Image: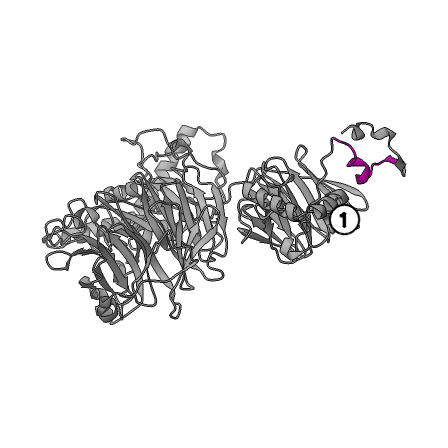
Amino acid sequence: MGVVRTWKKLPQIEGMPNISINNAVISPNVNYIRWKVHGDWVTQLNYYDSIKAVISSSNHEPTALVIGCTLGTTNVKQKMKEIRGVRKDVQARREQAFLGLPQRRAECDQTVFHIYKGVKAFSFCKRKNLLLTGGMDRIIRVWNPYLPGKPTGMLKSHTAPVIYIHVSAEDNKIFSMSTDNTIKIWDLETDSCLFTASSKASGIKGDFAACLYLPDSRSLCVATDTVALLHLRLRSPPEPCLVVSHQEPVVCCRYNPAFRQVVSCSEASVVRVWDFETGRLLSGFTGAHDSAGITCLTFDTSGRRLITGGRDGCLKIWSYNNGHCLHTLKHDEKQSEVCDCTYMEVNQNKCIIAVGWDRRINVYFDAPRDFHHFWKPQPHWQDDLNHGHKEDILCVAQCPPFLLATSSYDGEVIIWNVISGHIYCKLNTSRTSDDAEDGKDPDRCVSCLTFLKSRAAKFESAAASLITNGPGGSVTFWKLFGGACPIANFTPSRDKAQVSSIAVTAGDALAYMADQEGFVHVYDIKEYGLQGPELQSPKNVTFWRAHVSVVTSLELIEEKFLLSSSLDRTVRLWSVDGKYIGTFGQHSPWDIFTPASWSHPRVPYEILTDPQSTPAHPVLGGDVAVLHTKEEEQDKVVEEKAKPEKTPNPRSPEDPIPEVEIKEDIDQWLPLDWNPPSGRTCGLGWPSIYQTLRCHEVACASPVGEKPDLSIIGSDLFNVNFLMKEKEGSEAAQKEQ
């Protein structure tokens, strides 16, 4: 580039040295190539050395943005095609090269994005593997640069065409500017608008000329009629009281052991991928089922594909790391909502089983060699058509090698043999006694099914092999072999809240049950229901409140952690004994291998302030009067002595609760590592923090308005005290007379 080195000697135009393209290409060190890429004016052009490619944009929709090579194809087959083409018309090619006419890239050398109304500005970030575009439609689109078919996110807030975009990976921020000179700052992880500076607020006026972000000074330089420098003042944001993982209610979440990631879905058809070890957001995409909400998700056996079901009646198979839809599964009949799905492998045949409002078992074979985008289900089982569910199917659960359980809105549970397609047995839930007494028609739907797989695999006839939820907050243990029947029934929730999710450890030793009020109850079921019917509930190991709304998913991870999601828009991680690790998406990440980085002993703010989180004790509930005067206690003692002795009965709600019982109950509610504020041990002479308060009457020292006796001033204090006591004694004697 000797021409550039001698730029001072070049001819000047308006006082500036310049060189034309025609003169530059004469130099032997210059390799001149012209590509015909767009069908309209080029609006922006950048070369990125990290990917060795040129990215350009235009307002032409079919070629709105193109990522292409600089020097041409390296594909051998494509080279051979070009050589054969040159042989056919050598002279035309020579003339084209001599005149410098633009050439077209090979298809393998470029990636073309078709974007509505074209692109006026873009920004590429290799570190985050993101590409952002903006244009006349005022929408900023977020893309995976290798998947031009569909954006992974859209930022909608600008009211004028977007003319500048920049991604700052260091600050996790997106800077954008529109033609009305409005500047916006976005959060790169949540795609939310953090700050808006209008033209009036920033003082930027005139026609836009250029814009540049300066990372060293963290400032935005904008050139219009004048040059403005806007400094970005980043203050450490306080940890918000309410941390959410989604902007909408979370309907399901699952752990992917292959990549050690957590995938969650919301009612707005948003899918997000989280890092299990830190809680950070890794990626996500919107509009998974267009405007329809997502209802369920699962993975294939390899963990490389995500399967979601939606209210649109479709199942979709995704490469969930980049949001690319591989297949769409649906039948030809009227589309009904999919409520649940599972991935199952039977005799080396892999299939996806879905259930929902169509009241049928839909089986889709997973055929890797079937490259069609749309897959249809297999013909329905004959038993399913003749003797299947009569109401909407809400849940499905599998138990290898061949058992499948489904439950419906009317409380019917059917156990299927997947190999033959026949019904193994039917289970029917009954009404609770409370509902029968009240004369109400209870909600008999069964929405949770969990196999006790270690028992079911042994075909133990006397042992319970299935757990289901039921009406009135009940949980039922079912015996499946040797005559199907319920052998245990109890209610975990104190308010009879319906159980919404159940998870069991690998050896069927512990059962985790979450209800619609957000509580998680842990029961020891290792020996429960093994020998026949049980009259009592299993031992309650512990319980805590995980959410303030319905728990939609519960999953045990590596037998050490518990994953939960809820309609309160959060996805949370806990230890198996209830220690709070954190909420996915919180500001400060955790290290799963370092318990000191966990949020424990803190609890989520909304749980701490919710009234339902208080312990269930008659004193705290206002059912027992704790404060008693001394006279009331003496009267009660006299009444008790006057009553004839009788056998002790259970204490009535009106009786005071002994302090020992209050202490035991509060001990269960407080954290294990909680200590009293005082460092002293409670012994004789020191009041216990659990003792109840007593009311005492305070006698009035003197009548209102009585003047004090000033004659004692200057007198001997000993004599004054003696005289006062003598006076008080005479007054008391007069009262007795």
Say which of 518 and 9 sits in front: 9
Residue 258 sits in quarter: top left
Count every numbered label the image shows and give the total: 1
Q: Which x, y percent locates residue 614?
A: 35, 49
Say which of 79 and 37 sits in front: 79
In the displayed structure, 66 sits above or below 136; it is above
Q: Kindly tell me whether residue 566 is visible in this rendering.
A: no
Is 644 on the left or on the right of 231, as rendered? Answer: left
Q: Which residue is mark 1?
A: 208
Quarter placement of the N terminus: top right
Is 508 on the left or on the right of 122, as rendered? Answer: left
Is 228 on the left or on the right of 639, as rendered? Answer: right
Visual colour scheme: one colour
Of helix, strand and loop, which one carries label 1?
A: loop
Magenta segment: does it hold 465?
no
Region rendered in magenta = 16-28
Is 617 on the left or on the right of 600, as rendered? Answer: left
In the displayed structure, 1 sits above or below 382; it is above
Q: Which x, y percent locates residue 677?
A: 38, 34
Q: Amino acid at mark 1?
A: Phe
Q: Which x, y percent locates residue 557?
A: 32, 42
